[in-house]
Image (tube, helix red, strand yellow):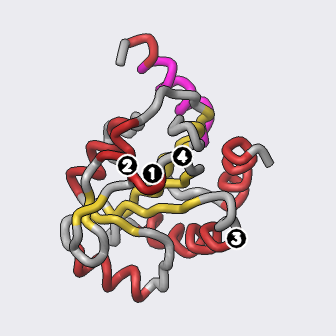
Amino acid sequence: MNTRRLFLILALTLANPVASICAADHEMLFTTPFMDLHDQPTNLQAYRGKPLMVNFWARACPPCREELPLLNSVSHRYAQDLTVIGIAVEEQTEAVRDFVSAYELDYPILVGQQAGIRLMADFGNHIAGLPFTVFINARGELVRQKTGALTEAEIVDALGVLLGM
């Protein structure tokens, strides 16, 4: 990534907490290997061509824990138009599985600490701040991103851009 583009992305991100960024295809999103909650290797290839809201989180992150019920609600409310995916930036699949069960999360959750950190960096989050959410359109382009917990208003605004609502 050239310096000018990196500066532009950083400036847009700092100027608007849910930055509107039309970026190139992020192939790594679909090819990065993760573990599913059954300890089986997987990636996001099956979600290629669909609008996505990808949320990076960790069990030890209080803002992440507060945000998860809202994401679960969004996954139900917009199920026809959007896929919400959680990526737990952790190594312990069993601990994440127990946590997901306790929080009654029923959208796809993947696990992978190093893979998640690398993927966040690919989207411009080089400090690995959590929670971190990206909105990807059906062409695989980054439309919006946010470091920190999302509000319902921010999600609705981002979905308006992502889904043309």
Question: Sequence order check: which comes first, mark 1 or mark 4?
Answer: 4
Q: Earlier in the sequence, mark 2 or mark 4?
A: 4
- The numbered disc on residue 77 is 3
Secondary structure of the residue carrying numbered label 1 = strand
Kindly identify the amino acid type of the residue bearing the numbered disc 1: Phe
Mark 2 in CB contact with mark 1 (< 8 angstroms): yes
Separation of marks 4 and 3 at Cα, in angstroms: 20 Å
The Cα atoms of the two marked residues, 2 and 1, are separated by 6 Å
Residue 90 showing in the rendered view: no
Front position among marks 4 and 3:
4
Residue 138 spot, x, y in % from top left: 58, 43
Name the amino acid, label 2.
Gly
How far is disc 1 from disc 3 in space, using C-alphas?
21 Å
Q: Nearer the viewer, mark 2 or mark 1?
A: 1
Q: Residue under circle 2?
A: 129
Is residue 10 found inside the magenta-colored segment of the image? yes
The residue shown at (80%, 48%) is 165
In the figure, is residue 38 to the left or right of 48? left
Task: Please tell me in which quadrant of the rendered image residue 78 appears.
Answer: bottom right
Q: Earlier in the sequence, mark 2 or mark 3?
A: 3
- Give the side of residue 73 with respect to residue 101, left or right: right
Location of mark 1 (residue): 132
> Residue at horizontal 53%, vertical 67%?
67
Between residue 104 and residue 163, name the one nearer to us.
163
Q: Position of residue 118 (x, y in %)?
A: 27, 43
Q: What is the C-alpha distance between the residues marked 2 and 4? A: 27 Å
Residue 49's disc number: 4
What span is in magenta? 6-18
SS of the residue at dot 2? loop
